Amino acid sequence: MTYIPLKGSQCSKVSFWLSALVLSSIASHALFDDISKSHSCFNAEASMAKASSVDASCLIDASPAIEDAHPGTAAEPGVWSGQHIRSPLARAVYNKLKEDERNKNDRHVYWYRVITNRLSEDLQAKFIQFDQDEGADQFLDNCLDKSNQVLTQVFYSLARPILNFFMTQTSINGFLHRGSMFIFSKPQFEKLLNISPYYKGESLLDLGAGDGMVTKHMSSYFHTTYATEMSGVMVRRLQAEGFKVLGVDEWSSTGLKFDLISCLNLLDRCDKPVTLLAEIKKSLKPGTGRLLVAVVIPFKPYVEFDSKTHQPTEYIHVKGSNFEEQVQHFDSIFKQSGFEVEKFTRLPYLCEGDLRHSFYMLTDVLFVLKPVEDDS
C-alpha cells in the first residue's frame, strides 16, 4: 500500500474529521444498548447458582459454552454461552468480560515455560526461568482499564481504517497513542544483564524503539540513550521522551560504541537482518558490549516499511516445529554472525488491546549475546 505523508496542518484536519465521525456514530443509542445487554448476560451467568433465568433479550437459548472454555478443556454443562447473543458488538463485549475474568485468576505460567530437555546441554545451562511479576501485573491491569474505556476504543476502531490511507500500522499506533508494548520488567532486565539496580552504563542504543515504552525500562541504567525508528510519528514521540534519535541508515557509521544494543522484535521486521547483526557487532564496545535480542516464535518475517512484497531481501531460514527447536536454531544463526549466547529466556510479548481483548500476546525468546572476537 502507498501511504500519503501528512503535514502538521493536515494532521489537525484528519483529527477534526475523525472526531466528527465518532461523534456522529456515538449519537446512536444502539452502541450503549449492545454493551448494556452484554453486561446483563455476563452478570446473569455469574449468578446462575442463585437464579434459574437470564435476560431473554440477550440470549436465544442456553447452550453449553464450548467456545468460551479454556483451550484444551471442556465447558461445564449449564454454563451460558456468548455465541447466541444477537448483536455482534454485545457478543464481543460479553466474551471479553469472560476472558478478563479468567485472566484475573491466571498467573499464565505457560507463557514462560520451556521444555529444557529438548535443548542442548549448553543452552540448558544458559536458560533463566521467569514468571509473571509485578511489572507484568501492572501492565495487564493498565490494559484492562484502557480496554474498558468504551468510547475511546470505538474511536480507535473507527479511526484506523481512515488512517490506513496515510500511515503504516506502527505510525497509526503512535498517532493514536495506543498499542504500547511490554516485554520485561526492570528486575528481569537486571537479571538478564547481571547488573544491579544502581548500575550506570555509558550508552544504550535501542533499534526500532517504537513509542519508547520498553526503552524507558532500560534507559535509567545508562547515562545516554539513543534510539532508531522508521516511523516519523514514533520518532517525534521518542524525541519528546528525551532520547537521542539516530537515522536508521546512519547509526552504524557514526563511530559511536555502545555498552548495550537492544534489538527487540526487529529481526523479523527488517529488510536485511544478517547485515543488521554485522553492523551491531561493529558498534558494540570491545570486550564489554552486549546485544539484547528478542524474537517472536514462531519466526515469521514481515517487512512493514519500504517494501511492496513485505518480504525481506535477506532471509533467515529458521528451522524447527516448536519453541525449543527454533531457539536451538537461532543459537546456530548467532554463531554464524559472530555472537555467543550468554543467557536466554522465554517471555510474553504483550500489547495493549481493544474492545474485543484487553491485551494481545505473542511468544518472545530473549537472548543476551556476546560478540566473539574474530580469528586473526
Image (spheres, rainbow, N blue to C red):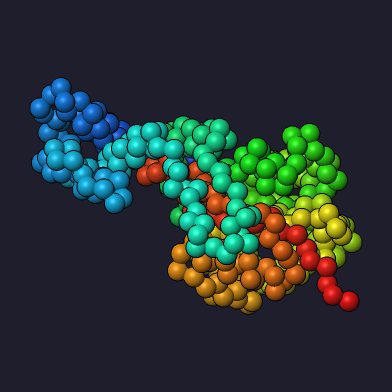
Q: Can residue 251 be seen in this view?
A: yes
Task: Give me the residue at 75% from left, 37% from top.
Answer: 196
In the image, is residue 281 above or below residue 355? Answer: below
Q: Nearer the viewer, residue 23 or 362?
A: 362
Residue 276 lies left or right of residue 52; in this view the side is right
In the image, is residue 282 above or below residue 50? Answer: below
Task: Give me the residue at 46% from left, 64% from top.
Answer: 322
Q: Which of 344 and 36 is in front in this view?
A: 344
Give the mark count: 0
Q: What percent of the width, then of the height, locates residue 343?
A: 66, 54
The quadrant where residue 126 appears: bottom right
Q: What percent of the width, then of the height, locates residue 94?
A: 28, 38
Q: Is residue 3 visible?
A: no
Residue 264 lies left or right of residue 62; in this view the side is right
The quadrant where residue 267 appears: bottom right
Q: Quadrant of the C terminus?
A: bottom right
Q: Nearer the viewer, residue 336 or 230?
A: 336
Q: What percent of the width, then of the height, locates residue 295?
A: 58, 59
Task: Give me the residue at 64% from left, 45% from top.
Answer: 214
Q: What percent of the width, then of the height, locates residue 207?
A: 71, 56
Residue 336 lies left or right of residue 351; in this view the side is right
Task: Give me the residue at 73% from left, 44% from top.
Answer: 194
